[in-house]
Amino acid sequence: MGAMNNMPAKDINSDLLSEVFSTLRLRSQLYFKTDFKGPYAIELPHEQRRIRFHLVLQGQCWLTPNGMESHLLNEGDLVIVPDGVSQIVSHSNNLDYPSPVTLSVALEQGCFDGGVLSYGEGEGRCRLLCGFCQFDEDIDHPILINLPPLLILNQEALGPEPWTSSALKLLKLEAEFAGQGARGILARLLEIILIQLVRRLSLDLDYKQKGFIAALSDIQLSKALNVIHQTPQKAWTVNSLAQIAGMSRARFSDYFTRLVGLPPIEYLTLWRLMRARLLLSSTDYSIDRVAELCGYASTPSFSSRFKRQFGQGPGTYRRRVRDYDYT
């Protein structure tokens, strides 16, 4: 992995949303396609740190995430369950018949061939594409914490938004085509749709008044977030960040904490450590240089803070993540 030399300078209009997802090491993968027939109810287990996707390729089904109401999904719908909760996919919203079986039982009783899970017999057919996005498992960024518990996208609702609508159409076309490169394209499309969705939330009147997206959309707070992201190596204080935002210290601190979910200096520390993890995993910079770029006056103080946050020192983390990436 070569050092990121000649990195381009950033300006006040830098794309913070893309930076956050890149630094979180967003990655998507596919589980499988399904071919369900007749009465069925299959329970998917809880999976921490995963954002699950189900795209309805044919037919319809009901989705019941744990602790939430059931939702009917029709052909072309994409449902996103951000926090990896257990959920039941079924032919109806009556979960008493048939009784739900676990995914492991469905795999044993059905047939798994060529990446397709076939299960059940009888009339009615539902074909799904199932996948997930995952992030750096040791980081809890506010952008993840503030996602709604369930999101359903369909072409009717996306009519005036050609970018997301086009990505959703392409996702379905690629899933049906299943040619060479399809899995890679599908994984990238899932990531694109997730980022588009988070961006879309900033326009949602029920959502835009809270959370990290609201902070990005706020004229004053976005100035402070920009300098934190662009120059984490600077010795920022609450006072200096408040000046950048054009607010009093007390008002800035309260407003920032309320929208972002963390006090300004805690967010600065989080971003510095996130950047450190990215630099350790993707460059050949020395640990001294990483510490300097992330705002730490000395390598021992950086190493101590990194280990306190993540349970291992920066050198151990670099070796572990590189071994993982190459296995």
Image (cartoon, helix red, strand yellow):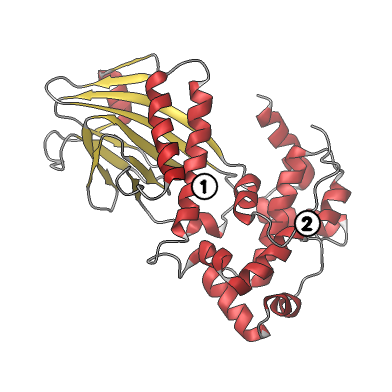
Would residue 266 be seen by someone viewing this image from the given angle? no
**What residue sits 25% from the left and 19% below the top?**
109
x%, y% of residue 56? Answer: 30, 33
Residue flagged by tag 1: what amino acid is it?
Ile
**What residue sits 53% from the left and 70% below the top?**
259
Determine whether the residue tagged by mark 2 lies in a helix, strand or loop.
helix
x%, y% of residue 199? Answer: 50, 54
Q: Crowdedness of circle 1 by 10 Å Cα count: few (<14), some, many (20+)?
A: some
Determine whether the residue tagged by mark 1 lies in a helix, strand or loop.
helix
Q: Is residue 174 above or below residue 141?
A: above
* Nearer the observer, 107 or 141: 141
* Nearer the observer, 167 or 287: 167
x%, y% of residue 273? Answer: 71, 55
**What residue sits 69% from the left and 25% below the top?**
326
**What residue sits 71% from the left and 47% below the top?**
277
Mark carried by residue 304: 2
Q: CA distance from mark 1 to mark 2?
A: 33 Å
In the picture of the structure, the residue carrying the numbered disc 1 is: 195
Residue flagged by tag 2: what amino acid is it?
Ser
Would residue 205 be seen by someone viewing this image from the given angle? yes
